[in-house]
Amino acid sequence: MRWEYKDNRLAAIGDDDFIVYLSRRNLLALLAKLDGHPKGSQCSIIRDSLQVIAEEDDEHYKERKPGKMHAETERKIKEMKRGKQE
């Protein structure tokens, strides 16, 4: 399988491996949707036959523990969560 979207930067490699490039704007849009903006929005970005779906951590990790991340990334996520709660 091979998808070649040069402008959208979406690629499928082999039978099982996929690379999806999301801009900061796309990532922020998914975060906004998770936070309910717009209200009732589906937490997804759909492009042709590909869907990128965002889930809350509690839902995503209900049957397993999250994987390890770089310590700096973990620190920044904790900072961002604290800032959101304030």
Image (cartoon, rainbow, N blue to C red):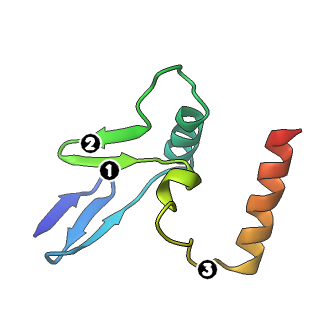
Whichever of callouts 3 and 2 sits on the residue coming sooner in the sequence is 2
Image-based side of 12 in relation to 67, left or right = left
The image shows residue 30 at horizontal and vertical percentages of 51, 41
Q: Callout 2: few (<14), some (14-19), or many (20+) C-alpha neighbours within 10 Å?
A: few
**Quadrant in which the C terminus appears:** top right
Q: Is residue 62 above or below residue 67?
A: above
Please name the residue shown 71% across and 70% down the image.
Answer: 73
Q: Are marks 1 and 3 in contact (CB under 8 Å)?
A: no
The image shows residue 71 at horizontal and vertical percentages of 75, 79
Task: Indicate the secondary structure of the residue bearing disc 2.
Answer: strand
Three-letter code for the amino acid on which mark 3 is drawn: Lys
Numbered tag placed on residue 68 in the rendering: 3
The image shows residue 69 at horizontal and vertical percentages of 64, 77
Q: Using the numbered discs, state the Cα–Cα distance from disc 2 to disc 1 in whole angstroms.
A: 9 Å
Task: Indicate the secondary structure of the residue bearing disc 1.
Answer: loop
Please name the residue shown 13% across and 68% down the image.
Answer: 2
- Quickly name the residue at label 2: 47
Q: Using the numbered discs, state the Cα–Cα distance from disc 3 to disc 2 in whole angstroms.
A: 29 Å
Q: Is residue 44 above or below residue 6?
A: above
Numbered tag placed on residue 8 in the rendering: 1
Q: Nearer the viewer, mark 1 or mark 3?
A: 3
Q: Using the numbered discs, state the Cα–Cα distance from disc 1 to disc 3 in whole angstroms.
A: 29 Å
The image shows residue 32 at horizontal and vertical percentages of 59, 34
Image-based side of 5 in relation to 2, left or right = right
Task: Indicate the secondary structure of the residue bearing disc 3.
Answer: loop
Whichever of callouts 1 and 3 sits on the residue coming sooner in the sequence is 1
Numbered tag placed on residue 75 in the rendering: none
Quadrant in the rendering for residue 45: top left
Whichever of callouts 2 and 1 sits on the residue coming sooner in the sequence is 1
